Image: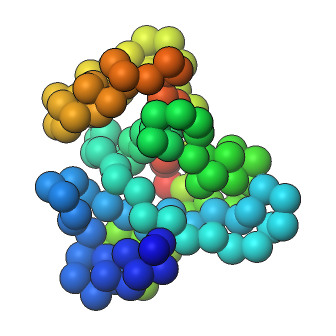
Amino acid sequence: MNARTVTRIRRKGGRMMGMEVLILHTAGRRSGQPRETPVTWFADGDDWLLVASGGGHRNPDWYANLMARPDRAAIELSGPDRVPVKPQRLEGTDRDRAWQRIVAAQPRYGKYQRKSHREYPVVRLTRR
């Protein structure tokens, strides 16, 4: 399913279900093999915010891969060019501010969070 979604994003642009979507390039945390994952994002100045909701129950694989091999992270926004990025998991007041920005843009994330037993990680990506 990821491969079809990535193809669609490359062909038609990065918007799905009313949200901006980018293609996150990571390397498998164990295998080191390249991975491409469509992920919703939120603007934060010149940076990108990602929510590792994983359906509410656990962190998604892309998050584990990103955190295990941050030096291999890149994104595609439009076109085939990759932008190398540096991930940072937000904590404390930084996360709170980012979370407010996210739920203001997409209130559904607040609803999802309230139904989960865990706090969703929020990751800021900055250009490397």
- Residue 104, x across and y down, in percent: 17, 29
Residue furthest to the right: 30
- Residue 83, x across and y down, in percent: 49, 67
Residue furthest to the top: 93
Q: In the rendered view, would you say 104 is above or below 73? A: above
Q: Quadrant of residue 8?
A: bottom left
**Residue 31 visible:** yes
Q: Quadrant of residue 84?
A: bottom right
- On screen, residue 27 versus residue 103, left or right, reads right
Residue sitting at 50 percent across and 18 percent down? Answer: 117
**Residue 101 visible:** no
- Visual colour scheme: rainbow
Q: In the rendered view, would you say 128 is above or below 68? A: below
- Residue 67, x across and y down, in percent: 68, 44
- Give the quadrant of the C terminus: bottom right
Count of marks placed on residues? 0
- On screen, residue 105 versus residue 54, left or right, reads left
Residue sitting at 34 percent across and 53 percent down? Answer: 40
Q: Quadrant of residue 20?
A: bottom left
- Give the quadrant of the N terminus: bottom left
- Residue 102, x across and y down, in percent: 27, 33
Residue sitting at 84 percent across and 59 percent down? Answer: 30
- On screen, residue 126 versus residue 58, left or right, reads left
Residue sitting at 21 percent across and 54 percent down? Answer: 19
**Front in this rendered view, residue 67 or 55:** 55
Q: In the rendered view, would you say 96 is above or below 14? A: above
**Front in this rendered view, residue 7 or 44:** 7
